[in-house]
Image: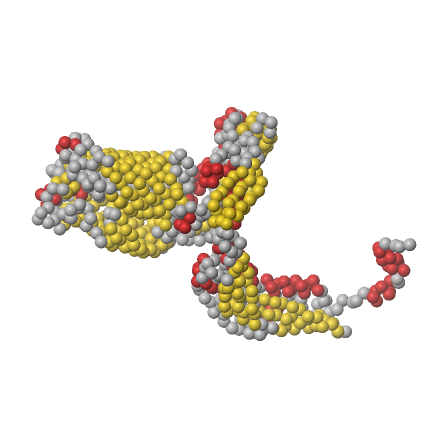
Amino acid sequence: MLFPAWWLLLALLVLVPPGLLAQLTPAPAKITKINLTNVGPQIVSEALIKANIRVKEGDMYNRAAVDDDVRNLYTTGYFYNVRVAEDRSADGVVLLYMLQARPVLTEIIFTGNKKYSRTQLFKKVSLTDYLEPPTPLAKTTIPKVSKTKMEAMVGQPLDERRLFSFSQEIKKLYQKNGYPKTECKYVLNIDERAGRGTVTFEITEAQKIRIEDVFFEGARDFSQRKLRKELKTRRHWFWSWLTRSGVLKDEQLEDDKEKLAEFYRSRGYIDFELKDLKFVQVGPRKMILHLVISEGRRYKVGAISYKGVTLFPTNDISKKLKMKVGDYFTPKGLTTDIEAIRDLYGNKGHIDTIVIARKTPNTQTGTMDLDYELEEKEKAFIEKIEIKGNTRTKDRVIRRELAVAPGELFDMTKVKLSKDRVEGTRLFERIEMQPEPTDVPNRRNLVVAVNERDTGKMGFGAGFSSVDSLLGFVEVAEENFQLPWFRGGGQKLRLRAQLGNVRQDYVLTFIEPWLFGKKLEFTSELYHHDLRNVSLNDFYEERLTGMRMGLTRALGRDSIRVGVSYTIENISILNVPDNAPQTIKDEAGTRLESRVGTSLAYDTRRTSFNVFLPDGGQRTELLTQVAGGPLGGDTDYYKLELRHNLYFKGLAQMHVLEFGGRLGVVDHYGRSTRVPLISRWFLGGIDTLRGYRQRQVGPQVGGEPVGGGTYWFGTMEYSIPIIELLRVAVFYDIGMVYQNPYSFDALNNGTGFYNDNWGLGLRLNIPQLGPLRLDYGIPIRAATVNDSNGRFQFSVGWTREY
């Protein structure tokens, strides 16, 4: 008969005498000595080693404790290999710790890399979290190399975790550029005695695979073209060499899977499923991608009910919801509606209210019933406001932007407004505002956590435009300035010098956003401009030297702002030749101008995809200027101008439609018999009528534009994205300048009632250079004194100051 093993063990324990069992169990041994030895050169002090060994001589031997010490030594980051040997005797146990310090990496070698050279791999491959290992308590000094992050490992202790990470980054580099099957591994060659080693990254490059086409099997409600636009994985085309598209990239394809699912679910297809991916090879380096999808049913919102609502009428909650009964149901819409309910409660201080949405799908009717369950909480008040993360910026710079204060109701609407205001200072990369519990039940601390950005910069470079020709500039700026301590006060200081073929500019600007502790922005500017490009026929040059001071503040809300300014300026008209028209000769010389200006602006512009280009909202501004009179100076005149522009989303995603218009008048008064040439209105050029030369449109004398007293201007532009860094635009401009103020009589200047043009443009966003604008304008109705040929215009920026 066979007995289970546990029966035999039980019988042994019962039958063996206790004394004999004790003799069979080895007695715990003491640690009599701990020795340390090094494999290769010793670069870590014994003091550091012993500080990380908790087992001491005289302790009872415990293998688990020894293993813990081995882990502690590895954790220091100084050791490549740690082994412990035991020598048992009747007296006890002697422990020998054999330590091999991390060998110094002396060389990085690449093999199999044909697509990228050694230098390119060093430049293109980097880890954002790479940190140089700490310098150990060593007997020898390890040299530091401040090159690329990858090259910086040379001369540092070898770190296999980093080497593995770099090998993965090399694979990603190839995958992102259309070599999806490329492999990379690292191989070490270590000289233990010398304490040095080399690493070889062995790269097995795969062929680049072009995508001939992308098909969506099972798509019913959306066209193939529409679905292709949602993916970055696209078929190869003429511009693929520039866009780097049209090749298979594993990481990009994974992102596209999520984007496709989000596209359908955001339109109510909750049951959407990507069933399969098929790669059909049509050549050695060509393939067709098939995405097999199941669209599922499109759900609409069914019944909406509420539970636990006592503080508000349910009708008030329903008004806040974006998804009504009968609308298509989307997860994003549900999230938005939950947030809207929280905001409704949060606006009244009930910030802890819990909102849970229960979804009940009905596959037969294609509806999604929603049941909002609320757990209402008491009102909360602000106990105190804590600011964290600001190492340079003064607390007051942040606190003055907050719309809430201690002791007030914890209003989440005001908290969000406060966050927007702090973001508007442009001093921080990240801003978070969260309530924090206190010991008092209905009291919360508001924690404002910020991550400061680098606000100081020094730059230099060169540029070119159709107006200013070749320009070089040097600029020093600090956006978190404070007198007299230089940093942390939220003030802005900028010094810019710009030199070119036809102009020179020197500008010193200082801005105090909170003058006297009030939300009152003070701006001061010292400038000198030497302009040799204002005359169409080189009949004169302008030189402006002056100072401007201004005050601006919001009226009730940030979107409405009023401003007042004072400018004193020395104006010179120079180098007027004898053959210049008499009108120009009369302007020659130097005069002093003293003027005051006012502005009233309403600005609701917003961007949803590009910081350079608004796609919603408007900006309307009324400007006035008065020169001379009681202000002094050599001329008396006044200006009135109205500017207005609108932005709309276009017919497809990231399409933008812009409308703009301006109207202005200028007239003399008092001692003056005419408006100075420099203060009159001019049209033409990159910022107005793009089919004409700079300042060409309007009254002329002897072929030289002399400006006018009244002008109007309108523009329309529609732009679409081609790739992420390139947009194409089509535009139409119209306008005219008239000789007399308050007059639209074209007979006075012989230029016609209006000039207009249409054209095409490119908007480039070049890394390190920024947004650039290239337009080709074609006149439609041009005055006889104007050139009717097409004209290229180019400048910096994607939008114009209408």
Q: Residue at x 87, y 62 (%)?
A: 18
Q: How is the image coloured?
A: secondary structure
Q: Which of 735 and 21 lies nearest the eye of the viewer?
A: 735
Q: Residue at x 51, y 58 (%)?
A: 205
Is 744 on the left or on the right of 123, as rendered?
Answer: left
Q: Is residue 384 visible?
A: no
Q: Residue at x 68, y 70 (%)?
A: 85
Q: Quadrant of the N terminus?
A: bottom right
| Residue 43 sits above or below residue 613 on the image | below
Q: Residue at x 60, y 70 (%)?
A: 100
| Residue 596 sits above or below residue 57 on the image | above
Q: Is residue 188 visible?
A: yes
Q: Which of 731 and 6 lies nearest the eye of the viewer?
A: 731
**Residue 145 picture location, percent across and down:** 45, 66
**Residue 36 picture location, percent across and down:** 63, 72
Which residue in the rendered view is the most extreme toward the front? 283
Q: Quadrant of the C terminus?
A: top left
**Residue 643 picture location, percent across and down:** 28, 36
Q: Using the rendered view, name the quadrant where residue 164 is placed.
A: bottom right
Is 166 on the left or on the right of 462, as rendered?
Answer: right
**Residue 203 picture location, percent across and down:** 52, 60
